[in-house]
Image (tube, rainbow, N blue to C red):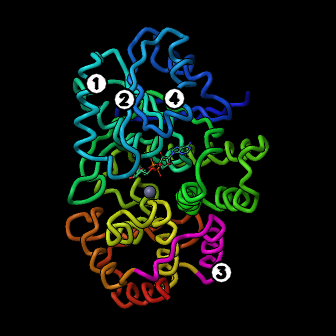
Amino acid sequence: MDRTLVNIKIPRQQTSYDITIGRGLLVDSGSWAAAALGNRDSKLLIVSNRKVFGLYGETVRKSLKDVGFKIEVHLIGDGERFKSFRTLQDTLAALSEKGLTRTDAVVALGGGVVGDLAGFAASLHLRGIDLLQIPTTLLSMIDSSVGGKTGINTSFGKNLVGTFHQPKAVLIDVGVLRSLDDRELTAGFCEAIKQAALAGPKLFQLTADILKADRRFDDPTVLDAVARLVAKQVAFKAKIVRGDETEATDNDSPTSRKILNFGHTFGHALEKVTDYKYLRHGEAVGYGIKFAAELSKKLELLDQDEVDSLNDVVRRAGMLPTISNIDPALVLESLKHDKKRVGNSLRWVLLRGIGKPVIVPDTEIPRSAVSSTLKTIFR
Ligand SMILES: NC(=O)c1ccc[n+]([C@@H]2O[C@H](COP(=O)([O-])OP(=O)(O)OC[C@H]3O[C@@H](n4cnc5c(N)ncnc54)[C@H](O)[C@@H]3O)[C@@H](O)[C@H]2O)c1
Ligand SMILES: [Zn+2]
């Protein structure tokens, strides 16, 4: 079976870890975990939700058990609202009740919600135990499982509490995308477009090409192409994280981790004004990319052809729910309270070409440019 390894270096901790990408890899999760943890007799707590565990849990559990690990399972609720203090508390209780010690590990099996929550719990239990990530959505494969950000939402907003806790290894089996519904795929592809637009023309073209093909994830050739795309996406994210693991506030360079926020400023505002219930995160990012592209054009950073090509690729990612029911004035208000504010300034990630991000403080952007971009997007 073909598999690709992408290694991510974490200079701060003088360590690195592997992300293994391929098709049909879950049946081998036991030997993968043994290699990553350097033993096969620790206790592992699989954190997942009912849906994902129902689909893939037994395969993973059996493979881990067969090599010698002792397995416990903890299921959390399905959905963004379970990325909460309450679920964190339950998961920490499970870790204690089931007696996980400092030589044991958490296995996160699921999308970004499971990964962020399980990663946060792993970073807190006994001041931090090992974490293995097995992401099962496209979004979590290319984005959230790699890079060590963990966290939960609070009543004040999304991801406001969390830690940096890098996994020991990440296992990506693209075969699980077969069961993912269309909306989740579209959301994942929007994050892929975001990363590709930052990375450069090669990854952008590769992503656009995959979106031209049919989404026939039961076809091994299609899945292998998706695995190649995921590997390239992950390699790009690994490069950025390596250079700026903790997203230093004073780093505004075009290679800083902040650039991954491209499409997220407007995206977060849309999510916020709809109470995180109407749009999938990736769908909001889809609109965010369109907004950032248009704003870049208004500031004479991008030309119309480049904006058209970004819009075209986002359109191919799939249908985004309409935003005509949203009040643009509320969105504008919400932009003023964005979490990514550093001091008093909100930094926009804009493009002056594919692969050429720039970070621009909002103080340097005329209000009229933002309001006319809003008009264009809501038209
Ligand atoms: N840590 C980071 O760096 C980072 C980066 C980006 C996003 N995130 C976070 O990720 C979260 C979003 O993650 P997501 O988009 O994966 O959503 P999600 O975890 O809610 O998963 C989406 C849905 O798909 C289901 N599902 C998962 N895998 C499946 C499969 N293989 N087959 C069928 N159904 C499956 C889930 O049960 C869920 O209903 C957000 O909370 C976001 O803040 C974190
Ligand atoms: Zn995102």
Say if disc 1 is inside 8 Å of ligand 1: no
Give the mark nearest the N terminus, 1 or 3: 1
Q: Which residue is mark 3?
A: 305
Give the numbered dot on residue 95. 1
Element type at mark 4? helix
Instruction: Tell me residue 295's x, y (percent).
Output: 46, 80
Regarding residue 89, the answer to whether it shows in the image is: yes
Looking at the image, residue 113 sits to the left or right of residue 203; the answer is left
- The residue at which mark 4 appears reads as 57
Under mark 4, the amino acid is Gly
* Disc 3 CB within 8 Å of nearest ligand 2 atom: no
Q: Identify which residue, 272 or 12, lies in the foreground.
A: 272
Closer to the camera: disc 1 or disc 4? 4
Under mark 1, the amino acid is Leu
Q: Are marks 1 and 4 in contact (CB under 8 Å)?
A: no
Q: Residues within 10 Å of mark 3 (few under 14, many from 20)?
A: few
Q: Position of residue 244 (x, y in %)?
A: 39, 47
Query: Which secondary structure lies at badge 3?
Result: helix
Image location (x, y in percent) of residue 112: 44, 46
* Amino acid tagged 3: Asp
Position of the N terminus, as image quadrant, is top right
Which mark's residue is nearer the viewer, 4 or 3? 4
